[in-house]
């Protein structure tokens, strides 16, 4: 069977090499971001790699790191994937609990499986070397082997009694000869981290050990694992030791303690004669397995984070994740590869550390010269680790701002559909606002430590305000439109506010008795509306922090989202199964609009003219796409419904002229919609 057959170029748009306009829904102009990723799978000979994300299956050419196709867009929400060893198939699982086996060339579905009727998400997939079986692990920690061609379960793995059931299998793979399946489970109660070795045909547990970072030798005769010291009472289960088992007899043939604080990664050489492992106290060890002695110790790499790996020719390399820079070294030659600097907080470093095979494949195939050319291409795989919430236009309407990856605020050029720059790149952002002058004010609330910080996004090293609070703060933040203060809810119901222009803590809003889910200032910043789990919605006077009135809610509902019209005369609120509007002057109900199919409008925004309201729904079971609905404020008529995101809509914003609508979703993307046909 020919390996690495080129995948069909589904959804490719000519002249769009980045995929910004691929597989767009009707009346969408662009999609920023490629979705949250779940995994990356390399084709057997590394000609292509596939990235499973919340919006579909992206195919990339390995040599150029450029996208060449986008599959599985009907549902998206991919949770796991893997190639068969012969390159003929690719297995894909999604959040609906469905596993598909697709022809890797034409995308035809050869087998489709759904093992359980209740909600079931597969987090791990691994093809057997003979391409007949797929090992799976789901969100309850259940491990099974499925027949890839018949779509039936071959075996369910024995894990014995467990204190709690959850998605604790974070590594799952067959041995190179296919006779064993190894899985490592974390957070399994008092046992700590455990690695299991099973028979794939029967599910029988062959043996297990405390520890992680297991590695099979190429001939599958040996298994190595990093383990705690059995002679010590180690409540933290720190890996001080290396154990090696003979897989034929299941007997441990070697066990040695290393003078190290914590061992972190291990790998066999291709010949199986040597075992390399690293530690968190800046040491790299190589063990001679034939003679059972230490061969070499390297102390040249000043880092607590290093990952060793061998090239196909048997040369030892190491990824060194330093304090500021990520580097790659040829260990035996003591040569650092000449690659561009990769800073730890950059998008390049993030992908390099999480999916090093994207670049290491070039090294292992003796193509070190190509590494330099490929490093910069990794940044084209940009995606969002956090939800793009909020999403806001700048006053000129030409630039869109959103939270970006793990840190910073990305500025997107609407016309070119590309990122211009990222502000506060090294800062974690909880929320931000765009002031009328165009300045961006950002905040980070660390609720578990009751700490907050506010700064100008263009001057991240000069905080405008820092504060602490003896309360469990929530992530819900409201900035005053005039740009002088912010309000933050708490889990107990108190809403705190700070004047960051005058750098002072203001009187809190006291009245709610439970978790604060929503807060919003009026356009003139004189009033604040809040919704709480105590099933009340309250209106506050900002100057005095006193309650003015309450808003009438649907029975036993929580106000999850609040929006003011730009004129300040109408308040819109979203709650479970209902959209409601109130008069902002006398707080009477203007409209009550039941929502279809129990969809909850938890993202709201008024158009600049105030005549229209956009609402975005959250995910409901068995729905493939979420709805964004446009409403006529005067009549309550639903004038249009847009379908595009596969999961929760969490942020909506209109351009200043009302011709564009941007939607940010839990899927990690922003879709830009053309409003001219509707408004």
Image: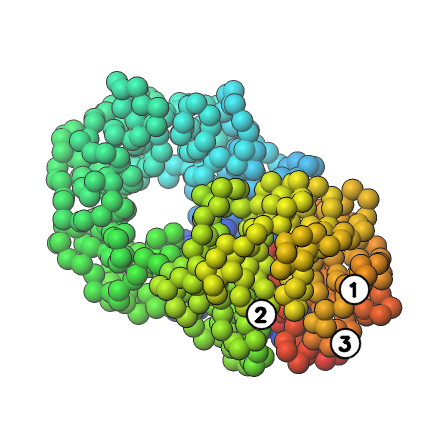
Numbered mark located on residue 678 in the image: 3
Count of numbered badges drawn on the protein: 3
Could you tell me which residue is drawn at 26 percent across and 35 percent down?
A: 262
Occupied quadrant, residue 594: bottom right
Secondary structure of residue under mark 3: loop
| 51 or 405: nearer the viewer | 405
Q: CA distance from mark 2 to mark 1?
A: 20 Å
Q: Is residue 616 left or right of residue 130?
A: right
Q: Please tell me whether residue 557 is drawn above or below residue 588 in the rendered image.
A: above
Label 2 sits on a secondary structure element that is loop
Please provide percent x and percent y for residue 518: 65, 53
Residue 585: give its label.
1
Q: Residue at x 66, y 81 (%)?
A: 657
- Image marks 2 and 3: residues in contact by CB distance under 8 Å: no
- Distance, label 2 to label 3, CA atoms, is 31 Å
Report the residue that reaches farthest toward the right. Answer: 635
Numbered circle sitting on residue 311? none
Mark 3 Cα within 10 Å, few/some/many (few <14, many 20+)? few
Question: Which residue is drawn at the image coordinates 34% and 37% (left, top)?
Answer: 213
Q: CA distance from mark 1 to mark 3?
A: 29 Å
Q: Marks 2 and 3: which is nearer the front?
A: 2
Determine if residue 244 is in view.
no
Numbered mark located on residue 482 in the image: 2
Question: Sequence-wise, which precedes: disc 1 or disc 3?
Answer: 1
Mark 2 surroundings within 10 Å by alpha-carbon count, few (fewer than 14), some (14 through 19), many (20 or more): few
Instruction: Please tell me which residue lies in front, 624 or 531.
Output: 531
């Amino acid at each position: 069977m020919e390996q690495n057959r080129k995948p069909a170029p589904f959804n490719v748009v000519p002249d769009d090499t980045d995929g910004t306009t691929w597989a767009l829904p009707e009346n969408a102009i662009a999609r920023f971001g490629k979705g949250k990723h779940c995994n990356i799978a390399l084709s057997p000979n590394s000609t292509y790699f596939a990235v499973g994300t919340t919006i579909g299956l992206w195919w990339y050419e390995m040599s150029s790191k450029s996208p060449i196709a986008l599959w599985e867009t009907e549902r998206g929400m991919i949770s796991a994937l893997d190639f068969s060893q012969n390159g003929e198939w690719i297995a894909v699982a999604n959040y609906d609990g469905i596993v598909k086996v697709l022809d890797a060339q034409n995308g035809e579905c050869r087998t489709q499986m759904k093992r359980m009727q209740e909600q079931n998400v597969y987090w791990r997939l691994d093809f057997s070397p003979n391409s007949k079986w797929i090992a799976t692990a789901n969100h309850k920690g259940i491990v099974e082997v499925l027949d890839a061609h018949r779509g039936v379960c071959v075996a369910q793995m024995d894990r014995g009694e467990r204190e709690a059931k959850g998605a604790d299998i974070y590594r799952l793979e067959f041995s190179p000869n296919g006779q064993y399946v190894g899985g490592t489970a974390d957070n399994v109660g008092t046992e700590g981290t455990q690695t299991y070795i099973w028979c794939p045909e029967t599910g029988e547990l062959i043996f297990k050990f405390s520890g992680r970072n297991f590695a099979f030798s190429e001939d599958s005769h040996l298994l190595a694992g990093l383990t705690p010291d059995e002679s010590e009472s180690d409540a933290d289960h720190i890996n001080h030791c290396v154990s090696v088992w003979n897989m034929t007899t299941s007997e441990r043939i070697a066990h040695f303690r290393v003078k190290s604080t914590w061992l972190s990664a291990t790998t066999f050489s291709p010949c199986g004669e040597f075992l390399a492992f690293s530690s968190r106290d800046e040491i790299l060890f190589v063990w001679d397995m034939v003679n059972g002695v230490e061969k070499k110790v390297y102390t040249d790499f000043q880092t607590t984070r290093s990952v060793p790996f061998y090239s196909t020719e048997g040369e030892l390399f190491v990824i060194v994740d330093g304090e500021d820079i990520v580097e790659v070294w040829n260990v035996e030659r003591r040569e650092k590869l000449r690659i561009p600097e990769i800073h730890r907080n950059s998008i390049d470093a993030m992908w390099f550390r999480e999916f090093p095979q994207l670049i290491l494949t070039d090294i292992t195939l003796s193509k070190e010269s190509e590494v330099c050319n490929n490093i910069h291409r990794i940044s084209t795989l940009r995606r969002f680790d956090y939800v793009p919430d909020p999403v806001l236009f700048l006053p000129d309407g030409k630039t869109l701002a959103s939270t970006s990856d793990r840190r910073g605020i990305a500025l997107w050029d609407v016309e070119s559909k590309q990122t211009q720059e990222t502000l506060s790149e090294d800062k974690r952002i909880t929320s931000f606002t765009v002031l009328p002058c165009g300045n961006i004010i950002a905040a980070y609330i660390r609720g578990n430590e009751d700490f907050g910080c506010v700064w100008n996004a263009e001057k991240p090293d000069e905080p405008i305000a820092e504060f602490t609070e003896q309360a469990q703060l929530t992530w819900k933040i409201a900035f005053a439109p005039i740009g002088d203060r912010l309000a933050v809810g708490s889990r107990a119901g108190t809403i705190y506010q700070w004047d960051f222009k005058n750098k002072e803590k203001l009187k809190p809003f006291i009245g709610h008795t439970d978790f604060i889910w929503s807060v919003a200032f009026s356009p003139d910043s004189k009033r604040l509306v809040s919704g709480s789990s105590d099933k009340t919605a309250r209106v506050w006077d900002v100057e005095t922090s006193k309650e003015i009135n309450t808003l009438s809610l649907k029975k036993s509902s929580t106000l999850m989202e609040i929006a003011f019209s730009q004129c300040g005369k109408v308040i819109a609120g979203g709650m479970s199964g209902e959209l409601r509007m109130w008069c902002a002057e006398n707080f009477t109900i203007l409209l009550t609009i039941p929502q279809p199919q129990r969809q909850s409008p938890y993202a709201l925004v008024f158009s600049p003219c105030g005549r229209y309201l956009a609402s975005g729904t959250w995910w409901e079971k068995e729905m493939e796409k979420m709805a964004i609905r446009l409403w006529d404020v005067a009549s309550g008529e639903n004038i249009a419904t847009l379908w595009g995101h596969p999961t929760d809509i969490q942020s909506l914003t209109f351009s200043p002229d009302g011709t564009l609508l941007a939607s940010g979703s839990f899927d990690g993307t922003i879709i830009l919609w053309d409003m001219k046909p509707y408004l």
